[in-house]
Image (spheres, coloured by chain):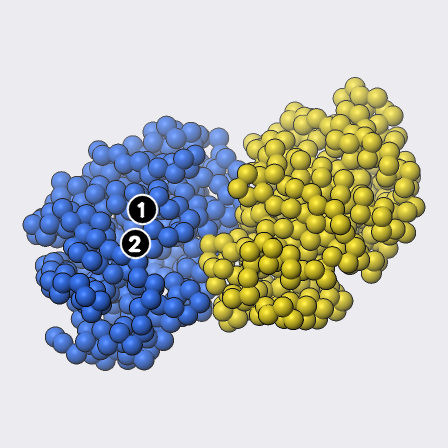
Chain colours: A yellow, B blue
Amino acid sequence: MRELKVDLGERSYPIYIGEGILDGLAATLAKHGIGVKSPLLVVTDENVAKHYLTKVTELLEADGYRVANAVVAPGEKSKSLSVMEEIITVALEAGLDRNSAVIALGGGVVGDLAGFVAASYMRGVRFVQIPTTILAHDSSVGGKVAVNHRLAKNVIGAFHQPEFVLYDIATLKSLPDRVVREGLSELVKEGFIMDREFVEWCDANASRLLALDSAALEHALYIGCGVKAKVVSADEKEGGLRAVLNLGHTIGHALEAVAGYDELHHGEAIAIGMVGAALLSAKLGNPPSIAEETERILRQFGLPVRIPAHFDTDAIMSAMMHDKKFKEGKMVFIVPTAIGQVEINPNVPSEWVREIVDRLKGEA
Amino acid sequence: MRELKVDLGERSYPIYIGEGILDGLAATLAKHGIGVKSPLLVVTDENVAKHYLTKVTELLEADGYRVANAVVAPGEKSKSLSVMEEIITVALEAGLDRNSAVIALGGGVVGDLAGFVAASYMRGVRFVQIPTTILAHDSSVGGKVAVNHRLAKNVIGAFHQPEFVLYDIATLKSLPDRVVREGLSELVKEGFIMDREFVEWCDANASRLLALDSAALEHALYIGCGVKAKVVSADEKEGGLRAVLNLGHTIGHALEAVAGYDELHHGEAIAIGMVGAALLSAKLGNPPSIAEETERILRQFGLPVRIPAHFDTDAIMSAMMHDKKFKEGKMVFIVPTAIGQVEINPNVPSEWVREIVDRLKGEA
């Protein structure tokens, strides 16, 4: 097992990464001062519940914990105030008090939702993250928790750091292939931001990662979480630096907003967005090789690197303009200046972005 | 105008108290770095809107601010996740961004609701409190914001400190008599907690306060807010000391829970609760004169000091046991040990409490 520290002063916490470490959950809770006196609440979704809810409940109860659970429908739709209210009903009926903890068992949706419940229940109770997807390495580190509003994603939330993150590699083995690929997209993104060596390692080890090799996954999650932890430590409340984590997300979010149901997963949209950011970089005067390399590496992971031709450019642009990352009308872009290095460019003309969107649609 | 500082390190903020200071709102916003670039949202209720919404909107617009507003129904029912969601719809449609501020214009309900919106919108935007009741002196200082769940009050919330609190004495002049009295109940409570001199001053100046004399109100709010600020500064996240603010609230909240519609206002329930806490104090061996003094002073303000005879003792006890202030089944009481001095007693037997409740019902 590897351990990584997210350094946030009083709110510092460790990320544990290893195969089979879920078996030690009760001991890890106890080590972090979460005792058996107050009930726990496990929040998960229907898919994850099938595989792990019984196991988690039984191993906690074996150690004397009382465990309530809230199982939500999979997908973004569960990130709502009304689902949150239902979970709080469960928490109240189970008698959760200020010494209780909320455990997120699942991917990013579950983590965001359970985290906002933990942040808000009785004005904040302790929170534990057990991510069960590769993609969730990103959302489970950093304390950003939220639910959606029908007009905007993640617009109702908080910063609420977990007590610890427990990443059991074994839980990733049952992931569908497409979910593995999109997770690797966000993982290699951490390298594109600030770790050229990691990008090269991912490039050389793509087949091991795609085959869910334990040692490769453990290494990649350790490095990927490490990049995220480093950025978050330097900028807990998203004042500036943290924006670099949004590489590929400006175009990516817009694509998700206009995509039809199940047409484009988050990690897939981000992959296309990263290619877009690299093309924008070339237009800003950086070497075109950055875009070529970015595209080649993402293709290795079987990720899409072009916008489906039927997507409407106006709709994509419009979705981007509504994104909350645009301060007072200006377009802010995270742009690679080399492989493993990015800059925050706050003055990107929207016509250039439109041109890139069109190019991403035009070529095969 | 008087100014009081709530000392919370980086999150410190001032409370401005004075007659007519609402006229300087725009300048005060500017002084606190809240500029005209991003729209503001004023949250208020129908009663307060009638008196002040047009005025506030006009004086802000005159200084170049764009102002959206959300007017909710008066009363606790508006403190819900669904009303919160509607307010966030208004915020999104008005284009509020991370540099925007939410202004609570009203009493405790508006402050709690608007504050939780501010705490959660885009994971936290700036917040300004303009309390328009005497009672709100308590809720507007300290950063506790929340909405209710159908099973429990204030159970979904956050700690979110305002940029400043602007207390315009002039807005109190239109308050109904009963609302004045219940506000004075919570105000004299600040004295009972830790300021004997202030209790004596309130005792001597009861008629001036009831007549809404400006100088008397300004002084009383300055001292009352000062006590609250002192306690909150020492214990921002309610670790221990802050509990003293709940003098009278343990029984008070239970009475509110079992009271019929409009039968008992918050400040009235707290008055009865303070007498109850003082009777409990006598039972614990403290001088019975504390209870006699407490009762005499509260009667001066025309406040109830007995539980209406038709209230059911079992229902009151049951409501108390469900209160979130009871950690793992034990009954915690804030008990006066003298006028202007309290202790936190975590081991009060519930039979004693029941006996006091019965006594409060029995006598006239």
Q: Disc 2, disc 1: CB below 8 Å?
A: yes
Separation (CA) of disc 2 from disc 1 = 8 Å
Q: Bin the neighbour count of mark 2 within 10 Å (Cα to Cα): few under 14, some 14-19, many 20 and up.
A: many
Figure quadrant of the C terminus of chain A: top right
Q: Secondary structure at mark 2?
A: helix
Please, what is the three-letter code of the amino acid marked with disc 1? Val
Q: Residue at x 74, y 46 (%)?
A: A2
Is residue A345 in view from this perspective?
A: yes
Above or below, B318 against B282 in this view is below
Q: Position of residue A353 (x, y in %)?
A: 74, 31
Q: Bin the neighbour count of mark 1 within 10 Å (Cα to Cα): few under 14, some 14-19, many 20 and up.
A: many
In the image shown, does B207 or A258 lie closer to the viewer?
A: B207
Q: Residue at x 18, y 52 (%)?
A: B340
- Horizontal side of B78 relative to B214 (left or right) equals right
In the image shown, does B162 or B22 lie closer to the viewer?
A: B162
| Residue that numbered label 1 is attached to | B231
Please, what is the three-letter code of the amino acid marked with disc 2? Leu
- What is the quadrant of residue A189 in the picture? top right
| Residue that numbered label 2 is attached to | B245
- What is the quadrant of residue B307 in the picture? bottom left
Return the chain for callout 2.
B
Of label 2 and label 1, which has the lower sequence position?
1
